[in-house]
Image (cartoon, helix red, strand yellow):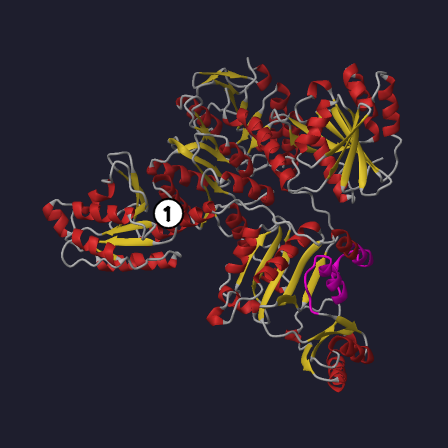
Amino acid sequence: MTDTRLRETAVHALLSDGESVGIRPLRPDDRDGVLELYAGMSPASLRLRFFGLTRDAGAGDVDRLFSTLSSRHAALVALRGDRIVGVAEYEVTDDPETAEIALAVAEDFHHRGVGTLLVEHLAHAARQSGVTGFAADTLASNHLMQKLVTDLGLRAERHHHDGEVRVTFPLTPDERYLSAVDRRGSTADLASLRPLLRPRSVAVIGAGTSPGSVGRAVLRKIHEGGFAGRLYAVNPHAHAILRIPCFPSVADLPRTPDLAVIAVPAAAVADTAEQCGAAGVRALVVLSSGLDAEQSATLVAACRRHGMRMVGPNCLGIAVTDEGISLDATFAAHRPLPGSAGVAVQSGGVGIALLDGLTRLGIGVSDFVSLGDKYDVSGNDMLQFWEADSGTAMALLHLESFGNPRAFSRTARRVARRIPVLTVDAGRSDAGRRAAASHTAAAATPTMTRQALFTQAGITATRTVAELLDTAALLHAQPLPAGTRVAVVSNAGGAAVLAADACAEAGLTVPELPADLIAELLGMLPEGAAAANPVDATAAVGEQALSECVDRLAQHGAVDAVLVVLVPTALATATGDDPRRALTHADPGGRPRTVAVVLLDQAEQVTLLHGRNGSAVPSYADPQAAARALAHAAARSVWLAQPPGIPAEVTGTDPSGARAVVAQFLAEHPDGGWLDPLRCTELLAHYGIAQIPTVLATGEDQAVEAFRDLTDGCRRAAMKAYWPGLLHKSEQGAVLLDLDGEPEVRAAYRELASRFGDVMTGVVLQPMARRGTELVAGVVQDEVFGPLVLFGLGGTATEVLADHAARLAPLTVRDVRDLITAPRCAPLLFGYHGGGPVDLEGLEQVLLRLSALACDLPQLAEADLNPVVARHDGVLAVDVRVRVLPRQVTDPYLRRLR
């Protein structure tokens, strides 16, 4: 009845009002449900759907729909509970790449996004079946259908004739389409999270009568925290807890709460969630832990069936400090300080550390969400919520896993343009990953993959919680530095040296100051001062002189930030002229550049020094912490200064031809494997990646003939042994170079045949590549993060030197340029020591085309181009290895709940 590529189980997705529906393929037992859908449609809707007024049209369409037994046809239904509220279908036309579509939506679900969701999911199924475009015939008066097509974001064409409109649109998910999906997703997500994060009423289920009860502790915190809405307790064994009315069950509550906090034993969680859903509760916070796989699945199913959003299970709870809400539904020891940082963590311990740190710094939180096991609400959801929240000025995340990293990256790129997004990157490795085979896969470590995600998305990734708080303090209190130039000012020469070293290690520069500025500073400072940078203000410097010095540096364009390092001195104690006071005595207008302080006798890692005019300066206990925070701030400034990147368009590719190469190989090798050299050449040719001519010979005479064809007798050749699965040829002595003439070719063939015997199935011959810079370019398909493009120094030493950079596909032009400039070998590409630059445009094209290849072919497990020889007159891939696997990958941008 439907395309077998469609999943039989329902996925759930959000509507524009925050409710959810299930979407799955049409089944034979759906006949009555579809009839009921049509029976409930108004005469006007029936006319628009069937071009006629008769109700018999619906019954006739059902007969047709359920008799279409062809792989050319697919149909999806949208369900609210067990009720079918929408149906959409496509049928392939005489053109196998085009399909006609039709859809119908229940009257009470109009204007809620059901039709758009169905078409998005139908388009995904069609793409996987090779359909590249949809067409639909509608009445000119069918404004709903025409608006749906317009709002999709795909480039539609309309042809009007006799009161009808034929609409056609390609299914290519370009940036315009993905941006439209982003907008729909953000609207729906925000609406769905309001009952969770801005509830008007809360019930705590499982609040016990004993003081040690987690539910009781949360109930007490909500009550004492001044929650502005209605608060209920649910416990069948009590009439009141903490003087708060208590009811036997959710069904007995006088009003249905927006949010239920569940703190019951694991075995009772799923049933409790089902009761909440049946009562109309919109959101859950599940504190309970220890659920087994079956209990977890039942819990998620209840949430999906009833359209509830859920935080947890196994979480610390949530807190909202908005004055109109004031909800502290956590069992942390202290109430969070109201403030401007949104915090989402998976680890409760990390969450408590961040809450304590943000309170101590005076930054406070707007929302705190302990995600726990993250069955539903994720970091991506929270970023979208904070994007629209004027009370959140900074997002702090601690995520141990990523459910959909590519969707998270798109969201983070957008949100980070408005507010800083910081995270702790613990660099956890995945012990379950397969052992890497190619150079590319060996280099593409989990840490490198995560770093690529953070770098491209503009996320500030720190190594520890302490470093995250250090950076948050600076971003909260100071303007961003425009660059990496730092002036170091100190009252002790040794401390200044330590600070300068810390800046250099963090990637900052401490430039020598201009002569005129040095003269100005020396005129302000005590005798014996030095002002070249670092600025040694001497132990005799007082408040006024230091203040004038810092102000002048902050106003001058020679540096982007000022780092002041002070040690306590007997002079300051004796005179009472404490230079520390200069740090907060800025002009009323504030200093125009970033200022940070290091107080070497400070007990706390970081604190904020507040001035009389409301300004604040971050103060650190050691120079390394200050330098790292400044480096993070400078990196954010650089990222913001560049325009948002969009995936680069690559022309001259043939995805259909490439898919045919892969399909033919997988038909012969159902479990996948490494393509032979000729298939590798053919695959890359479909994407316009220049390669050195390659011939596969299976005998000595063929090898000689190939030598003649490749070299015309004028060039030397390379011969490489080949058999399926051979990867590191040089390490196995399977490469012979500089073969000159037919006798040497014959001798080389015999040598390899003797060395490898029957395992060798042939030899690869290539003309010797002209000398150039040897690089490696490749891609590996990460099961979670998607395709990762890697670039760096190549050749036989690529793994030893480990000079690589990586970015997640699809690449933008900015990503490609970052890739090329990031490795240590980059100066070789730009004309090191007057050698002249390589063909940089050609190099960019290789990386962009690899990115496109990986995005178009999910079966591409890894591709390794090593070496890629880059010269001033072109870029050639010399050795290519490609591994493919039989798999279908779900569109990472397809809207659906976890």
Density class for disc 1 (Cα within 10 Å; few <14, some 14-19, many ≥20) is many
Is residue 761 at all visible to an observer of this figure? no
Residue 37 in the image: above or below residue 153: above
Q: Quadrant of the C terminus?
A: top right
Q: In percent of the image, x 85 and y 29: which residue is there?
A: 65
For residue 142, side relative to residue 347 (left or right): right
How far from the left and from the top, in percent, is residue 343? 46, 37
Q: In percent of the image, x 16 and y 53: which residue is there?
A: 523
How far from the left and from the top, in percent, is residue 73? 83, 36
Specify start and end residues of the magenta stretch as a single range: 663-692
Residue 8 in the image: above or below residue 670: above
Judged from this view, the residue extending furthest toward the left is: 574
Magenta stretch: residue 680 in it? Answer: yes
Frontmost residue, 527 versus 493: 527
How far from the left and from the top, in percent, is residue 362? 34, 35
Q: Which residue is mark 1?
A: 481
For residue 278, side relative to residue 418 (left or right): right
Q: Quadrant of the N terminus?
A: top right
Frontmost residue, 613 versus 883: 613
Residue 742 in the image: above or below residue 462: below
Q: Mark 1: which secondary structure? A: loop
Q: In percent of the image, x 79 and y 76: which residue is there?
A: 758
- Count of residue discs: 1
Magenta stretch: residue 540 in it? Answer: no
Is residue 482 at all visible to an observer of this figure? yes
Frontmost residue, 282 versus 866: 866
Residue 513 sits in which quadrant? bottom left
For residue 713, side relative to residue 438 (left or right): right
Frontmost residue, 196 versus 166: 166
Q: In percent of the image, x 55 and y 12: which residue is there?
A: 254
